[in-house]
Image: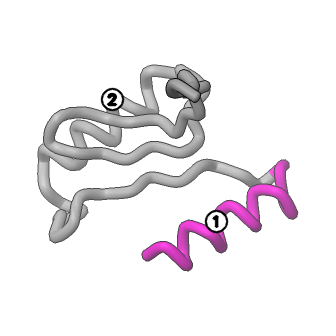
Amino acid sequence: ATSLWGLGIGLSLDQPDSWGGLVDLPAGADAADAAVLDGLYAVVSAGGGEDQVALRAQGAYGRRMERAPLGDR
């Protein structure tokens, strides 16, 4: 699964006009499962500009980088 995600990232850089996004489904999820489809619909229809999302039972998670505070030196 990780290699497919990496391939998707590479394609997004190579073909930005054709880029649609990546969605990571929970392990063992059935694509026809109503909860999975509801979560996917919620992410797509929200229009928040997310192009990489992980759907989990707790919600949808977008990819973020945050500055971490430096520890005591």
Q: Residue at the spot x=31%, y=57% of the render?
A: 25
- Give amino acid for label 1: Gly
Q: Nearer the viewer, mark 2 or mark 1?
A: 1
Left or right placement of residue 61 versus residue 28 in this view: right
Q: Residue furthest front?
A: 73
Segment tinted magenta in the rendering: 1-17
Q: Quick check: 1 above or below 13?
A: below
State which quarter of the image contains the C terminus. top right
Disc number for residue 42: 2
Q: Residue at the spot x=63%, y=49% of the render?
A: 20
Q: Residue at the spot x=55%, y=33% of the render?
A: 64
Position of residue 7 measured from the top left corner of the image (x, y, whole percent): 65, 73
Q: Callout 1 environment at 10 Å: few (<14), some (14 to 19), or many (20+)?
A: some
Residue 65 lies in the magenta stretch: no
- Is disc 1 placed on a helix, strand or loop? helix
Q: Which residue is mark 1?
A: 8
Left or right placement of residue 24 versus residue 70 in this view: left
Say which label, 2 or 1, has the lower sequence index: 1
Residue 15 lies in the magenta stretch: yes
